[in-house]
Amino acid sequence: ICHVLQESLLSSASGYSNYRGILNWCVVMLVLCNARLFLENLIKYGILVDPIQVVSLFLKDPYNWPASCLIIVSNVFIMAALYTERRLSVGTISETTGTFLYLVNLTTLLFFPSATVLTLTSITPVGGAFALCVYTILFMKLYSYKDVNMWCREIRHTKARTLTRSHSCPSFAQSNGSAVHTHVSYPGNLTHRDIYYFVFAPTLCYELNFPRSPRIRKSFLLRRLFEMLFFIQLQIGLVQQWMVPTIQNSMKPFQDMDFSRMIERMLKLAVPNHLIWLIFFYWFFHSSMNFVAELMRFGDREFYQDWWNSETVTYFWSNWNIPVHKWCLRHFYKPLMGRGVNKWVAQTAIFLVSAFFHEYLVSVPLKMFRLWAFMGMMSQIPLAWFVGRFLRGNYGNAAVWISLIIAVGRKQWSNIFC
């Protein structure tokens, strides 16, 4: 028999799914196309990479480091949170007073650095953005620190053994690999060592007893360190060699409002812009966070999931930044749902808070308030609805990738021209 009933290999009904050769072909074509652009760039502009020049983005005066001083001052807010918890643990102050003190501490923690960045001309945009990132992370950490310790006081007051909202207060010893760690219970966690371990740990959600790895793997640590150094230099090189000349050549079309040239410039910048974003993701969420986790023997290494397979926008936002997702879920989404708030209202509130912090980290360092970052983040809500309702499978995944490329490019152009 020469013929049987069967579908063509590329038909969806055939059930064929091994497209590895086509994927390899796509990778080869991408490499060849970008190699041509790279050679064209070198021929046209020469070598523009200068790592030393990057230092000037952080420092105008080598003897005056305002951004670094601002980060050092953040210890005041850490100590304020610790000593507030100590007073609450012994009943020296009431829960109402403690809540008020936390409100003052956390509010000041957000507005003090932003006011400093806006008033001091010696702080560069890059240095200001870095300092505000540190303060934003610290704000989320101290908020989690407040909530978990409050839950632990609820346990102590109600004589309960378990915490229904969080497993942060075990009072027994557990084994982790070959090592057995002494687990603490509230208020034995209210120490300088404990809070500073949490401040430097690669997580935003506080626990009294974090999972710990049995030892530091030196080879793993060195690999991550090499990746950190290599990829940060690669990002700097791509920005200086590829993006800066394109941006400089884009000024005239935008000034003349030449729409065809504007679109051509934006499309030309989209490739290196998105490539740098992908490198940044690997550098930060894999290399850097694993390096810190290994150094601190922090056991939970789930910093991201398979966001690249996202078929919906909500799946992407839930999986590309797991520390932030866990914080939002634990300290924002579930408390709102527990109070009877509608699911869509709670999700919209999370996007609203996220949009605020995106604008906070863009507009304050640049000292220009255009609300582009805020509106860009809020536009994810109708996009998430459209993709989730009308697109599925590969179409949904393609829509997510297109939205990522456009979103990253839009943010970059807003930073340049605002």
Image (cartoon, rainbow, N blue to C red):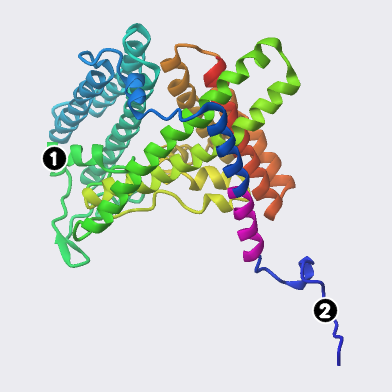
Amino acid type, mark 2:
Gln
- Front residue of 46/398: it is 46
Residue 88 falls left or right of residue 226: left
Tell me which secondary structure the magenta stretch mostly adopts: helix
Residue named by callout 2:
6
Asked if one can make out residue 396 in the rendered structure from this viewpoint, the answer is yes
* Residue 142 % position (x, y): 29, 32
Whether residue 22 is in magenta: the answer is yes
Residue 2 falls left or right of residue 271: right
Residue named by callout 1:
193
Instruction: Evaluate if marks 1 and 2 touch, with contact meaning CB atoms under 8 Å apart.
Output: no
Residue 123 falls left or right of residue 2: left
- Front residue of 269/92: it is 269
Numbered range of the magenta stretch: 20-31
Residue at point 70%, 27% (across, down): 264
Residue at point 35%, 11% (across, down): 115
